[in-house]
Image: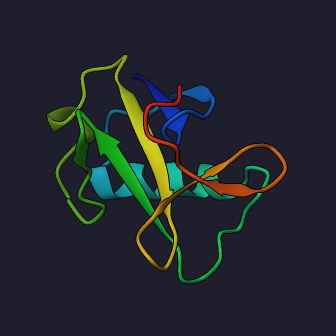
Amino acid sequence: MWINVRMGSYGHTRGQDVNEKLTIAEFWRQVVRGVEMEDGFPLPEDWDIDLQSRKKSIDGTSDELITTLFDGGETVYAKMYDADGRERVWDGISWNYHSPGRR
């Protein structure tokens, strides 16, 4: 199944082929590994990654199959938050704070 992963609120989008037999937790780890291989990574230890679909966080511990959440073609948003809980975005050179309304 094909799932798009968008980096942050206004980053680039990359599609990936996902095995339909993966659990949601396995998919979550696969996406986070991919995010960590991007430029600007690894993230500082006190930062968090939140994967979202349909404006809700994806439970990275669920052992349900990925097909209970997706049927293909959806977009997952990978958002990074600093130690203060503020969303950060990578501009290709450095980490900046998210500016609401920017696309």
* Residue located farthest toward the right when viewing the structure as drawn: 93
* Residue in the foreground of this view, choosing between 53 and 64: 53
* Residue in the foreground of this view, choosing between 9 and 22: 9
In screen coordinates, is 22 left or right of 94? Answer: left
Answer yes or no: is residue 30 visible.
no
- Which residue sits at x=30%, y=61%? 60
Q: Residue 16: percent from the left, percent from the top?
A: 55, 28
Q: Quadrant of residue 50?
A: bottom left
53, above or below 80, in the image: above
Answer yes or no: is residue 103 visible.
yes
Q: Residue 102: percent from the left, percent from the top?
A: 52, 30
Name the image quarter holding the N terminus: top left
Q: Residue 21: percent from the left, percent from the top?
A: 31, 40
* Residue located farthest toward the top when viewing the structure as drawn: 73
Q: Residue 7: percent from the left, percent from the top?
A: 56, 40
In screen coordinates, is 12 left or right of 31? Answer: right
- Which residue sits at x=52%, y=33%? 6
- Which residue sits at x=52%, y=43%? 99
Q: Quadrant of residue 36?
A: bottom right
All told, the count of numbered labels is 0
Specify how the rendered protein is coloured.
rainbow
In screen coordinates, is 62 left or right of 74? Answer: left
* Residue in the foreground of this view, choosing between 73 and 13: 13
70, above or below 57, in the image: above
- Which residue sits at x=73%, y=62%? 41
